[in-house]
Image (spheres, rainbow, N blue to C red):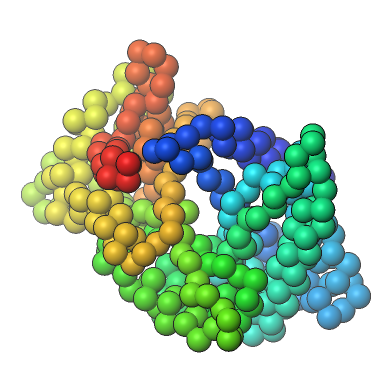
Amino acid sequence: MSTDADTLAIAALDQLINTKTVFSGGAPVKVILSLKHDFSYPYPVGATIPAGQFPDFTTPAGRAEIDEMVASIENLLITNNRGDDIDILVTGNEPMFEIQPNNNPDTARKYKLYLNYLIQRLVDLKTEENKKTVNGVKNTWDFQIFVGALNSPLNTTEAGQNVIISAVLEVARDNLDVAGIDLHEHVSDTNLVHSDIQYVKDQTKFRPLGGLPLQITSTEFSIIKIFQANMSLVPIGSTLPPLSQFINDTITQAAAGTPITQSEFLSYFLAQGWYQQNWFQEMIDAFESEGVLAVTYGLEEAPRYPWVDNQVKPTAMPWVLNGVYNATLLGRSSDGYPNTNPLVYPGFQSAIDRMQ
């Protein structure tokens, strides 16, 4: 049974597919679909995640579970002929966190078996669907298969024994049906974009004969780790509140219908010695210089209701600061649309302008 989140995600995919009739800069909109397999939940709550959490393709029970997972993916693509409108399909979402236990070599072995099996089924599905004609038009299922998405792979690898990252990189390197790899660049320093991409390129450069160099996309990026590291910091001599309190006060104002102005919001960050003002532009520059194929960023941060659910703890990773348009922190304009986020919008608009 699908959860409400699954239903909304599929509805969002269909809405995105509908935009393919729109042209941007003279080219049609492209669609990237990222799959999500979350095996990070212990049962019961608080229990240690067992080594057998992820199914083993080599056992009858594991094969049956994996076949069910893959069949649901195939059904998603076949329904409404969605696969014909997808340009890139990413096989996972941050598996280094969602495939657990991520320090267990046997878990990495099982995930690698799954990925190769899924990729082959996707290749076979494209072949079968391209024999069909829908509404008088021959199918052209030609989406590229990417693995990932890896979140700051170099930093995460160095931070501990995360063997899932290596498994994903091995599949990317060795499987010729893989066209690329997706990265989530959530960093503590914008220079780490270069380090991550160079690490991935180095780990995957020796592909089998006939294999093309892997393409790279980044479907998420931010300096969220800088924000998180400074959530409780109170600079000596400063009268400003710590970041966590500032965020919560700002949310409270937005909830009351009297949001802080964008200039006041920005001034708080400009007064912080740790804030990298040009971070968005610096990351775009890094992606461009590294030859990244495509980069996407979250458009909107919409409030959850009741408003108290938007409040953050001093130890939280403050995702609420992201989003080009941010109604949670900055409210809405007179026309009802979310106000733009001054931490993001100038760099975002500049990136769009330079691509045209």
Residue depicted at 63% across the width and 55% down the height: 143
Does residue 188 appear in this view?
A: no
- Quadrant where the N terminus sits is top right
- The reply, left or right, for residue 85 in relation to residue 211 is right
Q: Quadrant location of residue 158?
A: bottom left
User: Of residues 165 and 275, which is closer to you in this image?
Assistant: 165
Q: In which quarter of the image is residue 350?
A: top left
Q: Residue 251 location in percent, x, y? A: 37, 31
In the rendering, at what x and y percent does residue 277 appear? 19, 49
Residue 285 visible here: yes
Q: Residue at image x 73%, y 64%?
A: 123
Q: Position of residue 5 (x, y in %)?
A: 66, 41
Question: 343 or 112, which lies in front?
Answer: 112
Quarter of the image for residue 261 reads: top left
Q: How many labels does the image show?
A: 0
In the shown orientation, is residue 194 left or right of residue 34? left
Q: Is residue 180 left or right of residue 249?
A: right
Report the quarter where the C terminus lies. top left
